[in-house]
Amino acid sequence: MTAASTSTAVLAVLGVSAALAAGAPRTAAADAASAAGAPRTAAADVGDGDGARAVTARAEARPTAVSLQLATLDRTGGAIQAERATGWRKTSVAVALGARTAARGDFDSLTVGAGLELRRWLRRSFSMRGWYLAARTDLSRTSVDDALDGRRVGALTTWSLGAAVGYRLVLWRHLELTPSLGLATVVEAGAMSPVTARGAAIVGLTAGAFF
């Protein structure tokens, strides 16, 4: 091999090596660009996760209603009711508290009570609106006093258990109106009276805030 051919071969090898070396930075730059793109992908993933969590939070939001029981509302008494979705099988639970006073001649009476109602909503999409079926129980105690002597005459305990059907109408997104109708068994007992049981109709009507 001549010196000229040897020099030509060496220069060719050096040229290939230089070309490969020159290509390395481009590859590294591409790798760096790809690596630089990773945080953007992670941020996008975080954003997607936040959006998914927001959607889930909205889906899991439980409707609530706070109402007055208009069927028992008068100048001497009333009842307030709070209802919230349970998150289980399209059901909600309502709790009611009420009081009533009455005066008849020389006697005064005071009735305090509480109620618990489980509602099963019938709409395909659960929103605590439309038709529902309910099971309800109420417990109250009535005390009678002699207004002249200031002494307790007696007391009566009333317990009821019944079922009802109702319909909730929501107006302007935050005003609820809910009539209901059903049947109940009412049991009454007192210290000076025997235990009695009777059937009774349940007529309900509530109005209040829905959110």
Image: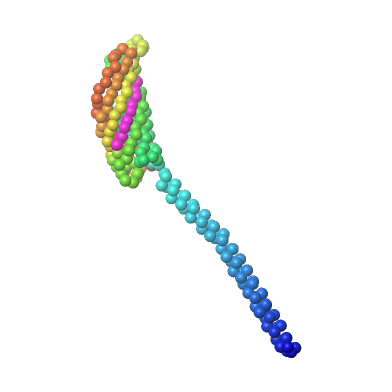
Q: Residue furthest right?
A: 3
- Viewer-nearest residue: 40 or 3: 3
Q: Quadrant of residue 106?
A: top left
Magenta span = 133-141
At horizontal 33% and vertical 16% (from top left) the residue drawn is 155
- Viewer-nearest residue: 85 or 175: 85
At horizontal 28% and vertical 23% (from top left) the residue drawn is 186
At horizontal 28% and vertical 14% (from top left) the residue drawn is 194
Q: Is residue 57 visible?
A: yes
Q: Position of residue 96 (x, y in %)?
A: 36, 30
Q: Position of residue 63 (x, y in %)?
A: 38, 41
At horizontal 33% and vertical 13% (from top left) the residue drawn is 191
Give the overall secondary structure of the magenta segment.
strand
**Could you tell me which quadrant the C terminus lies in?**
top left
Tell me, what colour scheme is on the image?
rainbow
- Viewer-nearest residue: 123 or 23: 23
Q: Quadrant of residue 75?
A: top left
* Depicted 99 relative to depicted 83: above or below: above
Q: Residue furthest front?
A: 1
